[in-house]
Image (cartoon, rainbow, N blue to C red):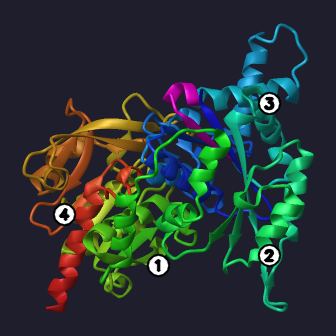
Amino acid sequence: MTKYIFVTGGVVSGLGKGITAASLGRLLKARGLKVAAQKLDPYINVDPGTMSPYQHGEVYVTEDGAETDLDLGHYERFIDEDLNQYSNLTTGKVYWNVLSKERRGEYLGETVQVIPHITNEIKDFIYRVGKKTNADVVITEIGGTTGDIESQPFLEAIRQVGLEVGRENSLYIHVTLVPFLKGSNEHKSKPTQHSVRELQGMGIKPDLIVLRCDEPLEEEIFKKTALFCNVKEDCIFENLTIPVLYEAPLMLEREHFSEIVCRELQLRAREPDLADWKAMVERIKGRKKTVTIGLVGKYTKLHDAYLSVAEALRHAGYDCGSRIDIRWIDSETVRENDSARVLGACDGIIVPGGFGTRGIDGMVEAARYCREHNVPYLGICLGMQIAVIEFARNVCSMKEASSREFDPDSPYKVIDFLPDQDDFTDKGGTLRLGAYPCSIKEGSRMDECYGSSLIYERHRHRYEFNNGYRDRLEANGLLVSGTSPDGKLVETVEIPGHDFYVGVQFHPEFKSRPNRPHPLFKGFVESALKRRDDLRG
């Protein structure tokens, strides 16, 4: 029978519930168990697809095209299992589903209420991910902080799950903050006690408590937490702030984290095989070089808006023995005749995805600077479209070239709607989402990176390369190096002879793993390192 683990958080937000859940997933997988993970978010948006990156961070896209919370990226990077549409649920989606059923008459005239209808919908979703993946263990993170009114239906639902599947098949993990007061030079367990009491008031008794802290905890803290929270002493764990994120599973396992989880769930599993993960962490700690990558985007004030891009760069750096110094460059600061000052210190430039017109001219200028100065360039989604626009304007003499998104009146819309779309489509419902195949041109830079003629990558976009300008752009030196298998959709472009100048319509960052960097990011970072070394002589 599938086992269910629930991870809640208390005291403050941003404690690292997602990292705790992801680390546990990695540890259980290392014990030979099949693990699935999901996140329940208490906001009323149906999904994060239309939310501002400044509020939510990046939107993570699964293989089957679900737009999800960024924590799912942590799950995939740590556990290395593809997640799906059942991996992220919001309050908005719950109520949407329940109200749709009510309108269809599926409740046969019943009064629709939070209990049982809303909670049943949540429970069905939790059970479904286990059935969909045939997982031994389902790890479910509850977004928000215990005590928030928004989270109450989710907490009630997971309480019911524990009752339905039985004590031996369910486990509750509570992550809390243990603050350190410099004035008294001691840690305080009281916030944890209050948070656990709040959770108990919802009918949930935590089985394990993970204490988030910046300094090592005194033995007394473990004893007090166990006594006052009614938890076994060996079920209290220290989660220290660490410089290397991917060391978290190893740190927790030194405290026998997964061993005790297996004990409490009566799971028979082998000892964890963490040799590959340990070797990766040693590589990370042993990096000697540093390469500077300029990330030119619209949301650089909030680094979480480009979380997966930054992680994919770091993964490539791990493999190349190099630290990645990311320069977060607001595209509005990149101007013509001043780009050398802003970008000159960068060994490579990446322009990530995004929507809207703000900062577009700065991205175009960054693409021009890289093309003319042979600086490695990687354009992702919007960044690929920017490369096409820049090439059309400055190489093909189409000075007013643009995208329909930015300038509907442009005489040269080199980027345009998807086929069969029009101005009246809903922005949140018509994106090209999820994994699609791409045929790679032999002998191209893409071919060199991937070593394959057919790849599958995840998409999240609405506009496409306009095939009406394909011949003109290619005649002037732009190489279409990747297309849909039928040749109709342009997926990748590059400039032959350039050290590295590649634009891709998809999002390769979503498939990068710390112990298996994405080949495109690896190729980009290698080119940036080579440029750095060449300039230094």
First of labels 4, 2 by sequence position: 2
The answer to if 134 sits in the magenta stretch is: yes
Looking at the rendered structure, the kind of residue marked 4 is Val
Marks 3/4: CA distance?
67 Å
Is label 1 in contact with label 3 (beta carbons under 8 Å)? Answer: no
Residue 213 is situated, as x and y percent measured from the top left of the image, at 69, 74
First of labels 3, 2 by sequence position: 3
Residue behind mark 4: 395
In the rendered view of the protein, which quadrant contains the N terminus? top right
Q: From the viewer's perspective, is residue 214 above or below residue 209?
A: below
Looking at the rendered structure, the kind of residue marked 2 is Glu
Is label 3 in contact with label 2 (beta carbons under 8 Å)? Answer: no
Is label 1 in contact with label 4 (beta carbons under 8 Å)? Answer: no
Q: Residue at x 28, y 67 (%)?
A: 319
Marks 4/2: CA distance?
69 Å
- Mark 3: secondary structure: helix
- Mark 4: secondary structure: loop
Marks 1/3: CA distance?
56 Å
In this view of the protein, which residue sits in the foreground, 234 or 152? Answer: 234
Neighbor class of circle 2 (other Cα within 10 Å; few <14, some 14-19, many 20+) is: few
Q: Give the range drawn in magenta.
A: 130-141
- Mark 1: secondary structure: helix
Marks 1/4: CA distance?
24 Å
Residue behind mark 2: 220
Q: In screen coordinates, is 161 left or right of 57?
A: right
Please name which of the two marks, 4 or 2, marks the residue nearer to the observer.
Answer: 2
Q: In screen coordinates, is 341 left or right of 129?
A: left
Residue behind mark 3: 163
First of labels 3, 4 by sequence position: 3
Q: Residue at x 87, y 27 (%)?
A: 115
Residue 527 is situated, as x and y percent measured from the top left of the image, at 20, 71
